Image (spheres, rainbow, N blue to C red):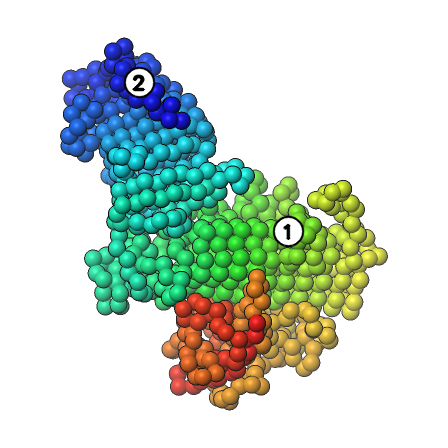
Amino acid sequence: MKRFFLVLICFALLFPLFAMTYYVSQDGTADFTTIQDAINFSSDTDYIIVHTGRYIEQVNTNGKQLVLASMYLYDPNPDYIENTIIDGSRLSCITVENDETVHINGFTLTNNELEPYTDFYTSVGGGVCIKEDSHVTISNCVIRNCTAKYGGGIGMTRGDGAVEISNVQIYHNQAFYRGGGIYVDTDFEFIFNSENLCSVFDNNAATGMDIMLFDYDDDETYPTIDINLDICSRAIEEPDQFFIATMYALAEIDIQNSYFGEIDSDIYVSPLGDDGYSGINPSEPLQTLKKALQMITVNPDNPRTIHLGTGVYSQTLNNQVFPLAVKSNVSIIGEGPEQTILDAEESASFFGILNSENINISGLSLNNSKQRGIHAVIDCVDSSDISYFNISINNLESIGFFFDRSSNILISNCILETEPSDNNSLNSFIANSCDDIVIKGFVSKNLKITNIDHNDIGVRFQECDLNISNAIFTGCEADDGAIFSFQNALNPESTKRLIMNNCLFFDNDVDTWHWTFAPVYIQDRYQTPIVTNCTFANNSGNSYFVYIIGEVELSNSIFYNPSCYGELYLKNRYENIFVNPPVTVIEDVYVNNCSFSSSQPSSTIPEQVYFTDCLYNTDPLFLGSVTDTLNIEDVNYYQLSENSPCIDAGTVDTLGLYLPEIDLAGRQRVWNDIVDMGVFEYGAPVSIQDETNLVPPTHIRHSVYPNPVNLVKGLSSFVNIEFSLPKKPIERPTLEIYNIRGQKVRDIKITQSFSQLVRSAGLSSEDKQSGEYYSQVWDCKDNNRKSVASGIYFYKVSCEGNEAIGKMMVVK
């Protein structure tokens, strides 16, 4: 490759003896008035020299070997760089894509300077787009205020070419996905000139705020790129996955200077703040979340928090920029979904997490992400210890949560919904090859796909370990889609499994034609899914509503879907093509204490499906079906009325069912020594009072489970702390964790109740709920995000003069 650059130098020095030179000027005094006309007329080895001016055009070198330069080539005056501008007007300023050899010298490149971005129109390289086997040098240029999906400043992909940049300044660029300043597909050889140093700083992207190196081959032969810079946003010594990110690539880094300083403390941000303030206390908040993330120090020994104050954060209102990468060991905490609102204004996604750990995002509304070319509203790859609490995602046309090859993930009290008229929603949640996903309290509402070429709706888990409880899926529509899909088929050694309980699927209308088997599709060829106390009711479609391949234990669930073709299909005989040699598998399936509106469900091998104490052709007599005060769009419709045959009809032995302590309304799950069918327990008190409680509460009922919790490495270790109040309080409750010495180890910020989550989805109202139910999850970490030691701990719930204290044990 050095030989290539030697040839290029000779090309630049010697070809004036043989080549033609064409001049471009906007005033009509030169050969051409546009750069593109000059290129179209030129031949290989020609020079295109551009006089000063703003050229609003998208330049394509059209397969030619050229030198494209400003007058800086003859007179190295920086004014020529500043005043010779190629403005791509939302598209790539310069595209080199046909196995070309091109030298670019002495320009300012921008495609987004005259108006703020509202959408991206180019996929790769907002300033310079390089593809195929092209060979390019870029010298003495400024690339700023450019946007693209990949590589806001420079982007290269699909080829084995080579690029060298020399004395290039790349700043204030935006990638809507990867590589704010530079995106490199490392099939290219990319050289940062080590003598005429470049600077790359203050750019923005979901991953790799300044630079992203990516190798598509994933063959474990990782290429290495030497990154030599004068200025970068931070003078790091190795990829930090924030400013400089790598995926299947390596980097050797030598940076002389940092553009930003560091703040080793919590940072406060407010829509009314100012990025010139210190940000270290609530009275001097920064204005933009981007600035806070750029400045905050990564401190594994003392993780920091960015506190987002009340208000709306958007580009129009207060200069916010999205999406943003997120640093390891940093939490982003808002005041609650109704108080702290991030608005993408029908443009970008919000957060990207890559090769990072120990991140908590909570207390936010994320609204109006409507770019279908963007991967997800919150994107997480190759990361661990990630938690999302109390998040509302509204009005989207992209994936909500995405996880790939990540572990120890917690989703708690989150909602994802779109407007009923929106027909372009995608998945609320996708996860691939992930360990230890816990979802506790989740609402997916009004997701719709009307294009038969898509099968994305609801949630999809592939090769994952999943424990999901207290989830609601409603109002979803699709011509061909799945509301819930879980598949574990590829790895015969897999120990991953599905545990699902207290999940409610109602009022969904989904047909299946080409892409999907059923709205609820479960396939596990190696482990036994556990599905307990779920309700599938008043759904409609042209297929079986639930389709299960493999062994399963299905208990205490209600199926009432007269408008579906069928309610449940059990495929317990199948060909396993993922083992060598392929084999025919016949599984035992156990269906215990379930109610069906039709006859016995269908299966491929009926004699090996064991039904115990099930009800057939049965109306469960939901509360809403016997009263005119509820409709089927209300969660409370699916409570059991006093004459329901599903009361006390569940399994007597609940051991091994992974049942939570509470039902979907916060009531005691196992009541009168037996469990009811479905997601609601009839007649049970609101939550329970643990016998280890130290202070008998007057107005607060509470429980904790599992207790003790076993912190096993590699497994999720979360403690569920549930409590209920007789009515919605005026002040927010507080939740604190203490060790046995009385030292506070954790404050858990409560921004909304589970009752509020359901109300905000329009699925209930205060006058139809009995008490205010809170479900909080403690990840067994202290305020510094460090795992606590084994021992006895106490939690204290306080609200409006009342308090309750409970005891729990952590063991390792």
Q: Nearer the viewer, mark 2 or mark 1?
A: 2
Task: Say which quarter of the image contains residue 537.
Answer: bottom right
Q: Which residue is mark 2?
A: 11
Q: Which residue is mark 1?
A: 487
Could you say whether the residue bearing mark 1 is in a helix, strand or loop?
strand
Task: Say which quarter of the image contains residue 18.
Answer: top left
Q: Say what amino acid the circle numbered 2 marks.
A: Phe
Q: CA distance from mark 2 to mark 1?
A: 56 Å
Q: Residues within 10 Å of mark 2 (few under 14, many from 20)?
A: some
Could you say whether the residue bearing mark 2 is in a helix, strand or loop?
helix
Q: Position of residue 441 (x, y in %)?
A: 53, 66
Residue found at x 69% / y 80%: 673
* Along the line of sight, the residue nearer the viewer: 594 or 10: 10
Residue found at x 48% / y 76%: 772
Q: Is 71 drawn above or below residue 182 in the view shown?
A: above
Q: Say what amino acid the circle numbered 1 marks.
A: Gln
* Residue 335 located left or right of residue 528: left
Residue found at x 32% / y 38%: 153
Residue found at x 36% / y 34%: 191
* Along the line of sight, the residue nearer the viewer: 510 or 46: 46
Q: Position of residue 606 (x, y in %)?
A: 82, 55
Q: Is 349 drawn above or below residue 696 in the view shown?
A: above
| Residue 474, visible in the rendered structure | no
